[in-house]
Amino acid sequence: MNYSLAPILNAAGIAIYVALGLTALYGVFCVILLVRQISQKRFLTQNAANEFLDQIHEDIEKKDYESVVNLCDSPPYWSKAVPQLILVAMANMERPAKKLRQMLAEKFERDILAELEYRVSWISTIVKSAPMLGLLGTVIGMINAFDKIGNMQESGGDPSQLAGEISFALFTTAAGLAVAIPLVMAGALIHVRIGKLQDSVQEHTGEFLDILEASRKS
């Protein structure tokens, strides 16, 4: 008694297409979310950063630390990385300058970079998984096609009709690559943005700490 694998293989093929679709959607979601998070953590322009730091400098020179805290906690700045780190510094002003720099660096890596890297790791996982899902779909489609060839040899039929099915099976590999390639490019863009965020945070935080240390000494 012969059993046909066609129903199982067809269901598996549909499941792989659904998985590819969901994978692509989640990859796009991660990219959009990362771009928004990085934009929220950075100043839009260098002029905006300079304006903020000038106001901080002015308040620190006046020893008006409460105004510094209020400015960093105001709606335009509360979600950005540098004001968040300044709030931590103001809450730990009694610490030595070296310890304070180390604390801010650790907090930036732990609370901000770690979350971004977590999302980036998911994009990397999708980039690796999508071509494998496509290849699995192709293999299943080819198994189904050869199964039908075997049935045709027994019952008769035109093997040329399988050309469309084989082409459709190979399409899953193309679909997997079509998901992975744009995400590779998006991941590279995000890595560049994260690098720029790190550079700007280090620069602006260092400038603030220099201002704070000068105020302490005076």
Image (cartoon, helix red, strand yellow):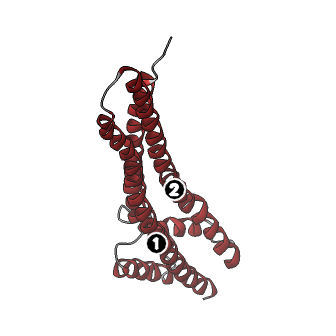
Q: At x 44% / y 65%, what residue is drawn?
A: 190
Q: Residues within 10 Å of mark 1 (few under 14, many from 20)?
A: few
Q: At x 57% / y 84%, what residue is drawn?
A: 210
Q: Nearer the viewer, residue 42 or 182?
A: 182
Q: Residue 114: x and y, percent?
A: 57, 58
Q: Residue 6: x and y, percent?
A: 42, 24
How much space separates mark 2 and mark 1, taking CA atoms?
Answer: 15 Å
Query: Is 36 displayed left or right of 109 in the figure?
Result: left
Q: Secondary structure at mark 1?
A: helix
The residue type indicated by label 2 comes to Ser
**Residue at mark 1:** 192
Query: Is 108 displayed left or right of 77 in the figure?
Result: right
Q: Quadrant of residue 19?
A: top left
Q: Nearer the viewer, residue 22 or 74?
A: 22
- Is residue 218 visible in the rendered image? The answer is yes
**Residue at mark 2:** 124
The residue type indicated by label 1 comes to Val
If you read the primary sequence from the N terminus, does the residue marked by circle 2 or circle 1 appear first?
A: 2
Q: Nearer the viewer, residue 142 or 197?
A: 142
Q: Residue 110: x and y, percent?
A: 61, 60
Q: Secondary structure at mark 2?
A: helix
